[in-house]
Image (cartoon, rainbow, N blue to C red):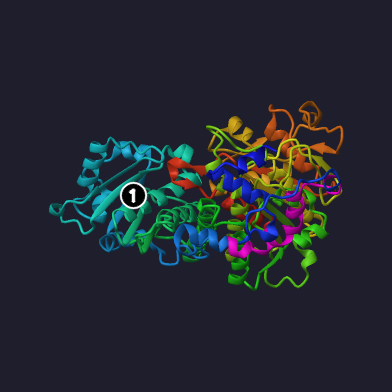
Amino acid sequence: LMLRKLTSRPSALTNVVRSLLTPHAAHARAPTRLAAPMTSAMISSSAMPVSRIATAQARPTSRRGVAAARRSTRAFAASGGSFPAGDMSPHAELAVSSSPVTEDAANAAAADMVVFSVCEEDCAKLAADDAVFEGIAPGLGALIKELVDEKEFKGKAGSTAFTRVPNATGLPFRHVGLVGVGDPAKTATSPEVWIGFGREAAKAAREAKCSSLYLRKYWMGDTAETFRTKAASIVLGAHLGSSADLRFKSKPEPSTLKTVTVSSPADADAASVAAALAEGAATAAGVTLTKQLVAAPPNVVTPTALAETATAIAAAFPETMSVKILEEAECRAMGMGAYLGVAEASDEPPKFIHLTYTPLGSENASSLKKVAVVGKGLTFDSGGYNIKAGAGSMIEMMKFDMGGAGATLGAARTVAELAPKGVQAHFIVASCENMIGSRGLRPGDILTASNGKTIEVNNTDAEGRLTLADAIVYAEKTAGAEKIVDVATLTGAIIVGLGPEVAGMFTPDDELAASLEAAAGSAGEPFWRMPVRESYWKACGMESDYADMKNTGSRGGGAITAALFLQKYVEKDTTKWAHLDIAGPVWDDKKGGATGFGAATLAKWIEGQGSE
């Protein structure tokens, strides 16, 4: 009655009300008529509101049928074109080589910039007539001494000092620099330090618009194996520092740096040094791909884009890599209710990615060790109905919630190029978005995972573990993995516990922990082993009165209970499992954002499995 009274008043509101009361069949051009009152019989004959019925009928077309167009529309709306999710060969234009230290003078003369690594002990003893510097170019010792004094450079690990060479010196290069490598007793073989040497030097050369760079260790007394390890790290760093991610700039400036030469001991084995350079370049390709995927916005890196990236890796290495992308219907047929429950509210179709590496000459695949890396692939996490809101929620940064998937695909890229023997590696990502909508997952819903376990969802923002649950089941049952390592930006609790630079490692298996720690040490990526304490399952409230478990427990011990949840989806006692929570180091604003963390560790771990 109130609406009918409003229609008699000449106003904009009147027109709106009339349009609502007008039957749809006559809506277009017919004279305005008031709808007949709805009777009680009409009301009782409807099982649900009209809007709910219409939504249900429209679901198959409106939600999945336009997925491809939606992705391109998103990118087009932002840029007028499509941005690349990631580059398979990001450093193709950079040539890195080595040259014996006996060619110092010629190498320095041919470079635009010369950079030296200097430890604290050597820095304290530097003089204007230093034999190393004077042997490269007369007058260089005095310039370096002046630089050290002016910048108060002490050689501490990660410290730098750069200067333009005055024309009056007559030196053949335009720029010179120093990168500190710290106390040799502590950092002599630390990959982080030597990666930093290469990265800081290349970054400085790029920013100075140099085209060529010569990298020279001040002290060249390494053993052959020690130098090989350092050289691989230096080359990795040089690749990482040689270019910036400018994909989303309207007028990107290409890097001018084209050649990098690394000095090597006079008696170095050429084949060993070449292998180190190849290892560094392959690792850099994987780490950079990871950085690009994590840094890209969620309208560019969608589940479809991750699937396309996996397909591109397989296409680039067809002899050893194969890929299978499971669509929603296939996942539904396999009973992946936990994963699909998270994906339900998004217009973007979920993509379940299974990329497999099998080494050449492996006619009998059963003789290979089978391992799996499972990456969390939430390309955007709104939190669902437990929405990320308020200061500190970081919803604007939730593009990096696929950091685990990025590390997984980055590791696959490196493994494909290095081609380790004796191991078959499965790279698995259950990718989707966690969004809000009428079809979305609700707090209180109960989901059934592909192994039959039921989950009471008491927080829709603890979605990553739901997707990982079905992916872990798949890794064990379908891929046949004997060892499974999952990697995820899973909890804020791990950042509270370990801070922004160290990732958490959870596994009940000491042997697996040792192999992961060795790989992380070689990669220069810090992990800290955390407890997998069974008593926390009950003590921290993971038990459910209605289902087999809840998806979250109490606030205390949140990173541990998340790991315990994932462990429930490893069925066999013989299957070894580890969980890596990389929520802290996946992103670092001080280092330019996405770090590529995890890719190098996973690649080295897989390589090590083949040699065990």
Q: Is 586 inside the magenta-drawn segment?
A: no
Give above or below for 541 relative to 226: above
Helix, strand or loop under label 1: strand
- Say left or right for 103 vs 517: left
Residue 89 image position (x, y, % from top left)? 50, 65
Q: Residue at x 41, y 55 (%)?
A: 244
Q: Quadrant of the N terminus?
A: top right
- Say left or right for 212 vs 441: left
- What span is in magenta? 43-70
- Say left or right for 58 vs 404: right
Residue 433 image position (x, y, % from top left)? 64, 51
Q: Residue at x 82, y 55 (%)?
A: 335
Q: Is residue 545 visible?
A: yes
Give above or below for 457 relative to 245: above
Residue marked by disc 1? 116
Q: Amino acid at mark 1?
A: Phe
Give above or below for 403 relative to 28: above
Who is closer to the viewer here, 222 or 536? 536
The residue at the far front in this view is 8
Q: Is 62 inside the magenta-drawn segment?
A: yes
